[in-house]
Amino acid sequence: MRLVDMSALVELREVSLQSEGEVILDRINLRVEQGDFLGIIGPNGAGKTTLLRIILGLQPLSSGTVILFGQPVETFRDWARLGYIPQRVALDPRFPATVAEVVASGLTGRTGLFRSPGPDAARAVEEALQLVGMAHHRQRLVGRLSVGQQQRALIARALVTRPELLLLDEPTGGIDPEAQEQFYELLQTLNRSHAVTLILVTHDIAVVGSAVRKLACLNRRLVFHGEPKEFLSDAALSSLYGAPVHLLSHRH
């Protein structure tokens, strides 16, 4: 019998997934420990979003094991310890919910669908809004915010349960470069000052060199897992993406 590694928040052991005879993921072994800021990069179709869904227990495996906080994902129930930001979906400007209401909806699993939030929930919403710099927008309709502000509101929603682990899937799509820079500064603050462990799927190779602490390079198989500086070179990235890649430095 194998012992469970209690030091890892997430552990994937020989995780494989096939669909209609196609290999989606092939024997993935990956550990995410407390305090990690893990960036996951890879070409389109590499299985990055699928990997997040597997960690969240939303995607059945063909084989392998997923351990969350020391428990098999099949029996894990303390989902408030995780937050999840899926790929961005544009919100209709007429969406009739305020920022505070959207954030409070993250507590539905605890408060119930039809119960009014009590003072503890109200404090949690306010803390989450303060943390992402959105407290002064609390009464604005979320559909009328900028894309960057909407993403901050969705992060606040994910943080309202005070999760230990936050998973983000391409969170900066459609956000202008200045807002992206502020967004990644927020993630670094969450990781370094508020002890939130992060798993970030991104196409932004520049980010993984400056923001994340560890890097996982995925192309159906795990090509690399370690410090970004050990991998980020033209040759390594060209091998990962299957096409010539050239890194260019800029002031950001």
Image (tube, rainbow, N blue to C red):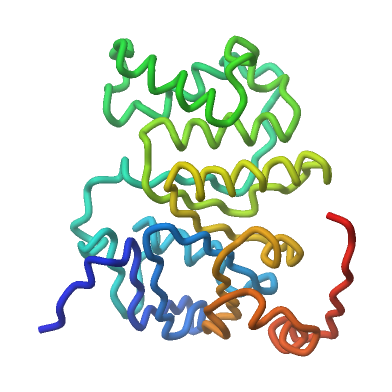
The location of residue 145, given as percent across then percent down, is 72, 23
Q: What residue lies at 56% left-to-right and 43% top-to-bottom?
A: 189
Instruction: Quarter of the image for the C terminus: give it.
Output: bottom right
Q: What residue lies at 58% left-to-right and 67% top-to-bottom?
A: 40
Q: Is 121 situated above or below 149? A: above
Q: Is 151 situated above or below 187? A: above
Q: Is 24 situated above or below 79? A: below
Q: Nearer the viewer, residue 68 or 219?
A: 68
Q: Residue furthest left?
A: 1
The location of residue 113, given as percent across then percent down, is 32, 21
In this image, 15 relative to 227: left or right? Answer: left
In this image, 140 relative to 23: left or right? Answer: right
Q: What residue lies at 56% left-to-right and 65% top-to-bottom?
A: 213
Q: Is 129 situated above or below 202? A: above
Instruction: Quarter of the image for the N terminus: give it.
Output: bottom left
The location of residue 46, given as percent across then percent down, is 61, 74
The location of residue 156, given as percent across then percent down, is 51, 31
Q: Residue furthest front?
A: 193
Picture mark count: 0
Q: What residue lies at 52% left-to-right and 43% top-to-bottom?
A: 190
Q: Which quarter of the figure has residue 127?
A: top left
Q: Which quarter of the figure has residue 202?
A: bottom right
